[in-house]
């Protein structure tokens, strides 16, 4: 069944309507009266609905059953990534959403070569949030991960450290594995930090340790900055029993 | 240190030479006499070399030490993917190489919308092998994964089934998890199969079972055809103790 995210207000109605981009999407899908679709409020609730009328510019639905979404991960994994080049960031947002990330947090670090200026940031953030919404819809998620931009590396460390487990991946780390970090104690929330194209500077690693993060390896091979967070998230979801 | 793959013949020499694309790459990197580089034979052996002369169109090296490559995964993971659209296949080849795949095997399946014709295949295979070589170089691997094209789904199943563990990922499977499949018995070789954009047909799942493959889920969220194999490979490498 096709899924659509609607506002909480629209979700509450007994006869919700698909409008704007949802309506355009419905036209592409050639939805017809009598078919079933799922609408989600993006906060973990979803309803199976019947299409009543798809002939106008908006699509008229009626709620058949309401239920809690069952596709969200049991653990809340926050993916922290230092600003990479634009196409890589969009790739990570799309894939991390599919893989079940709770949120995606972007931050500057010393070797970032690409950081949008204040002026363009608002528009970019809108675009990134749309990419997350679209990937959430396609992958059948009940929630749209928030895309959050922080303005300093220090702020990223402080925020990340509040999770039950906070891990930074560093290509020069050899001793501590992700498995050791995950096996240490049970966790419900986890922060996974990775660096930009040029990696982290060693002083940044010291800062992360001071902030309470564990420094881990992702293996003997050097992963690109867009591969590392998705590899880590896949492994964490596997470790958490998601598949 | 920068890495270059050279032929086995070139590798054996005491004064090997970087020629052609390697020489072009060396110019981009502005290699200078006295610097150190690593050359690999692509079969798991590597040498640290000193640059003797980088002023000509080829780069003259001398071997300092020879060693076995230490970056290859302990398990041999074969990634089998049904022909997706071209850009997605190239993405999977690059990322699976970074993540340590032993080989990447491409095959047709019922719902493939994109399969290159016989005529263009040879040229495409060359291109795919180059993508694997470049990703192997960048990620510091000692071997270049082979990219192999099979001409039927049946051939893919038969070949995949020869590994110690052979798993097909199916979005409609709910019961058997990857963890259950991996925990069943120890393994040194593993085949990971995933489908094209439109997924597998149920008759294909029956065929896979008959061929001896286990049918597993990758979780409750629907992964895109280019995300599923990389998620599975990341989880398998984690499970195998790589990180």
Image (cartoon, coloured by chain):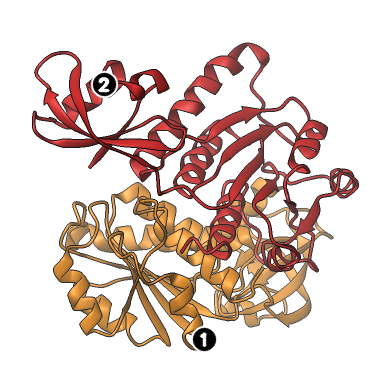
Chain colours: A orange, B red
Q: Vertical placement of A33 versus A160: above or below?
A: above
Q: Residue at x 79, y 56 (%)?
A: B215
- Residue marked by disc 1: A188
**Mark 1 Cα shell of 10 Å, populated few (<14), some (14-19), many (≥20):** few
> Which structural element holds mark 2?
loop
Horizontal side, residue A196 vs residue B224: left or right: left
Q: Can residue B200 be seen in this view?
A: yes
Judged from the image, the secondary structure of the residue bearing numbered disc 1 is loop
- Same chain for the residues at labels 2 and 1, yes or no? no
Identify the residue shown where x is 43% and y is 52%.
A91
Quote the CA–CA distance across marks 2 and 1.
54 Å
Please tell me in which quadrant of the rendered image residue B152 appears: top right
Q: Position of residue B169 (x, y in %)?
A: 72, 54
Q: Residue at x 42, y 70 (%)?
A: A177
Mark 2 = which residue? B16
B107 w.r.t. A182: above or below: above
Which numbered marker is on residue B208? none
- Residue A83 at x, y = what percent? 27, 59
- Circle 2 or circle 1, nearest the eye: 2
Mark 2, other Cα within 10 Å: few <14 / some 14–19 / many ≥20: some
């Amino acid at each position: 069944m096709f899924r659509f995210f609607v506002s909480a207000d629209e979700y509450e109605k007994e006869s919700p309507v698909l409008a704007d981009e949802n309506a355009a999407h419905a036209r592409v899908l050639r939805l017809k009266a009598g078919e079933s679709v799922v609408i989600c409020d993006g906060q973990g609730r979803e309803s199976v609905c019947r299409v009543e009328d798809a002939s106008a510019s908006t699509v008229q639905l009626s709620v058949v059953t309401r239920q809690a979404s069952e596709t969200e991960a049991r653990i809340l994994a926050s993916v922290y990534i230092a600003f990479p080049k634009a196409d890589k960031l969009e790739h990570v947002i799309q894939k991390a959403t599919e893989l079940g990330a709770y949120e995606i947090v972007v931050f500057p670090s010393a070797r970032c070569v690409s950081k949008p200026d204040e002026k363009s940031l608002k528009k970019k953030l809108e675009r990134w949030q749309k990419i997350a919404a679209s990937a959430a819809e396609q992958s059948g998620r009940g929630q749209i991960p928030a895309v959050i931009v922080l303005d300093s590396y220090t702020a990223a460390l402080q925020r990340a450290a509040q999770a039950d487990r906070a891990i930074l991946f560093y290509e020069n780390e050899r001793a501590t594995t992700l498995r050791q970090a995950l096996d240490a104690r049970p966790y419900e929330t986890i922060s996974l930090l990775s660096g930009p194209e040029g990696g982290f500077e060693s002083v940044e690693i010291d800062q992360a340790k001071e902030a309470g993060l564990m420094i881990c390896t992702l293996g003997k091979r050097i992963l690109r900055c867009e591969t590392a967070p998705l590899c880590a998230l896949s492994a964490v979801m596997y470790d958490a029993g998601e598949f």
